[in-house]
Image: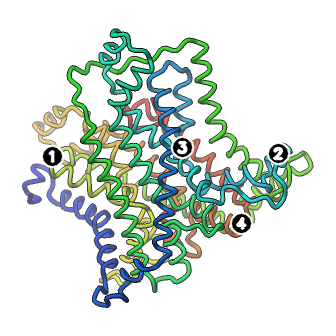
């Protein structure tokens, strides 16, 4: 379809600019990565593709990725399904706060999650030493294992299962459940014969999302796997890049394509089984009625849910806080050992800490602002596109977010390793390359709230303005912008919240002087300064919670579902 046919009364220069930006940010990196992965095939057995495929480390890392991701998916399914069913179909109280707390692990950076659990377990845990529960010195750290990696990834990705399954549960037809009850079915029969079959597609989609997310997770396998020499594909790529630099770009491109293909296969498998498991619900007239629990059973369920949250959220964060208040790991917290030295060091004497905060705030803020400016006209144009074209553009926008971050990072290195044409400026090793990667990766996060809000606008407002002589740009600014401003702001905050603590992309793109907060925590822990890493992590978690609360306040003016933790 030509730009003229697409644009209608929209400015052709705006349509061309928006579509060009999408192609450059979303499609170009993937194409460049594919070309590099299949380069030099004429070398036969000495080609990068052949060398990677006959390397035993590749297949070991592939097996490790499958094992940890599969186990993490089972853990995420258990936790996510428990909370989704309890909070969607029963009359538990405090639902809003339960959802908020359960969503928090997904918003906390994976490297902070790993660090908090490391401070909670093992013989050097300040919290366990303070309680007299620490194992004997010399005892192994149980989290330095495949099962430890899977446990933490399962906890972090359980909210994804919760969101996916909850969308199926809240749309269950009430009349089917009522019909089953009237027919004499007990609660167990209702669950097994009505609810489970109707939610099968949601379970399959949730499993695929959790598996793909675990497959691309870098922070947790890096913090827990590298010390134990247990490598998955993302950490194997990191080790290759850290040890050999640009000379192995072709080989790491092949490894990146392996992850990308696995992620794509997971998405396609999810779509295939979702279509097979989809039910046509005739006469759907309302949300499924809750299972009204007796007071004693309701209190028991509420206590169980809060106990799970205390174990997977409160205890690790408490351990993180205690670790930031002692002079060294292994020291118990008391009135004599309590110190704020780590925070003083972080705020006044650590130049790298201030620089990392500055870099992360600048990158996240700039990316959020630019994507807000881009998402407004993009959402406006998408609403006016035909169905197939709208689907194609949406798919392009989703690509950088769907593929693992390490794959996008390698693609950006390949694109910007050499100076840009014409201007002869190299972005490699600068904040500019991280900024561009953030624009590509988080575009879909900024766009979704605006699309949801724009889809609810009454087109007659714009038509009246058009009849009064207002041009497209004037209608966009004076009619559409004020109405979608809350969604635009929410999208920007979501991008900022996600980008400010990001590690998976920046771990391969940072350089000396261009550290980010995610890289800082990872490097501090890797360098043995875990107390300072804990102090930085406490500040990060505080910032995450504050931004989530701010988004919750904004959420009352947004379409339902834009803020994921608002019920």
3 and 4 marks in contact (CB < 8 Å): no
- Percent across and percent down for residue 547 are 54, 43
**Label 3 – label 4 distance at C-alpha:** 25 Å
Q: Mark 4 points at which residue?
A: 350
Per the image, label 1 sits on a secondary structure element best described as helix
In this picture, residue 229 sits left or right of residue 72: right
Placement of the C terminus among the 4 image quadrants: top left
4 and 2 marks in contact (CB < 8 Å): no
Decide which of tag 3 and tag 1 comes sooner along the chain: 1
Per the image, label 4 sits on a secondary structure element best described as loop
- In this view, 465 is above or below 6: above
Residue at (66, 56) in percent of width and height: 143
Decide which of tag 3 and tag 2 comes sooner along the chain: 2
Tell us which disc is closer to us: 4 or 2: 2
**Numbered badge on residue 547:** 3
Decide which of tag 3 and tag 4 comes sooner along the chain: 4
**Numbered badge on residue 472:** none
Q: Mark 2 points at which residue?
A: 133
**Label 3 – label 1 distance at C-alpha:** 35 Å
**Label 2 – label 1 distance at C-alpha:** 60 Å
Sort mark 1 into few (<14), some (14-19) or many (20+) by Cα contacts within 10 Å.
Answer: few
Front residue of 511/513: it is: 511
Decide which of tag 4 and tag 1 comes sooner along the chain: 4
Q: Name the residue under label 1.
A: 387
- In this view, 297 is above or below 121: above
In this picture, residue 415 sits left or right of residue 123: left
**Label 4 – label 2 distance at C-alpha:** 33 Å
Front residue of 432/179: it is: 179
């Amino acid at each position: 379809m030509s730009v003229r046919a697409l644009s209608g009364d929209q400015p052709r220069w705006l349509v061309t600019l928006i579509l060009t930006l999408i192609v450059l940010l979303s499609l170009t990196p993937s194409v460049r990565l594919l070309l590099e992965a299949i380069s030099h095939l004429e070398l036969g057995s000495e080609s990068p593709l052949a060398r990677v495929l006959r390397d035993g480390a590749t297949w070991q890392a592939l097996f490790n990725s499958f094992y940890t991701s599969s186990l993490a998916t089972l853990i995420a399914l258990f936790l996510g399904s428990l909370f989704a069913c309890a909070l969607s179909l029963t009359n538990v109280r405090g639902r809003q706060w339960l959802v908020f707390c359960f969503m928090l692990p997904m918003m906390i950076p994976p490297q902070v999650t790993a660090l908090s659990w490391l401070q909670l377990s093992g013989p050097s845990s300040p919290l366990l030493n303070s309680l007299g529960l620490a194992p004997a010195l010399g005892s192994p750290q149980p989290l330095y294992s495949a099962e430890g990696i899977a446990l933490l990834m399962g906890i972090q990705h359980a909210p994804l299962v919760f969101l996916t399954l909850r969308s199926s549960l809240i749309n269950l037809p009430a009349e089917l459940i009522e019909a089953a009850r009237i027919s004499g079915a007990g609660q167990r029969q209702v669950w097994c014969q009505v609810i489970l079959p109707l939610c099968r597609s949601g379970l399959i989609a949730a499993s695929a999302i959790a598996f793909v997310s675990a497959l691309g997770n870098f922070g947790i396998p890096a913090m827990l796997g590298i010390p134990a020499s247990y490598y998955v594909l993302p950490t194997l790529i990191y080790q290759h890049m850290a040890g050999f630099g640009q000379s192995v770009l072709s080989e790491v491109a092949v490894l990146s394509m392996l992850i990308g293909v696995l992620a794509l296969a997971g998405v396609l498998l999810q779509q295939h089984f979702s279509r097979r498991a989809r039910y046509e619900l005739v006469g759907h007239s309302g949300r499924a009625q809750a299972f009204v629990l007796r007071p004693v059973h309701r209190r028991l369920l509420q206590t169980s849910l809060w106990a799970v949250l205390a174990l997977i959220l409160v205890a690790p964060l408490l351990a993180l806080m205690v670790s930031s208040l002692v002079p060294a790991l292994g020291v118990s917290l008391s009135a004599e050992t309590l110190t704020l030295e780590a925070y003083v060091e972080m705020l006044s004497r650590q130049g790298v800490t201030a620089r990392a905060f500055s870099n992360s705030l600048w990158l996240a803020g700039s990316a959020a602002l630019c994507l807000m400016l881009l998402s407004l006209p993009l959402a406006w144009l998408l609403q006016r596109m035909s169905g197939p074209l709208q689907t194609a553009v949406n798919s392009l926008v989703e690509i950088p977010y769907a593929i693992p971050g390490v794959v996008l990072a390698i693609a950006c290195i390949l694109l910007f390793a050499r100076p840009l044409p014409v201007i002869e400026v190299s972005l490699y090793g600068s904040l500019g390359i991280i900024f561009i990667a953030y624009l590509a990766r988080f575009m879909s996060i900024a766009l979704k709230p605006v699309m949801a809000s724009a889809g609810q606008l009454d087109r007659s407002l714009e038509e009246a303005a058009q009849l009064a002589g207002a041009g497209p740009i004037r209608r966009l600014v004076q009619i559409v912008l004020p109405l979608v401003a809350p969604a635009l702001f929410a999208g920007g905050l979501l991008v900022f919240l996600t980008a400010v603590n990001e590690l998976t992309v920046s771990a391969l793109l940072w350089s000396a002087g261009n550290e980010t907060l995610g890289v800082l925590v990872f490097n501090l822990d890797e360098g043995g300064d875990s107390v300072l890493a804990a102090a930085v992590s406490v500040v990060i978690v505080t910032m995450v919670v504050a931004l989530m609360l701010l988004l919750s306040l904004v959420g009352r003016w947004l379409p339902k579902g834009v803020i994921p933790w608002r019920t």
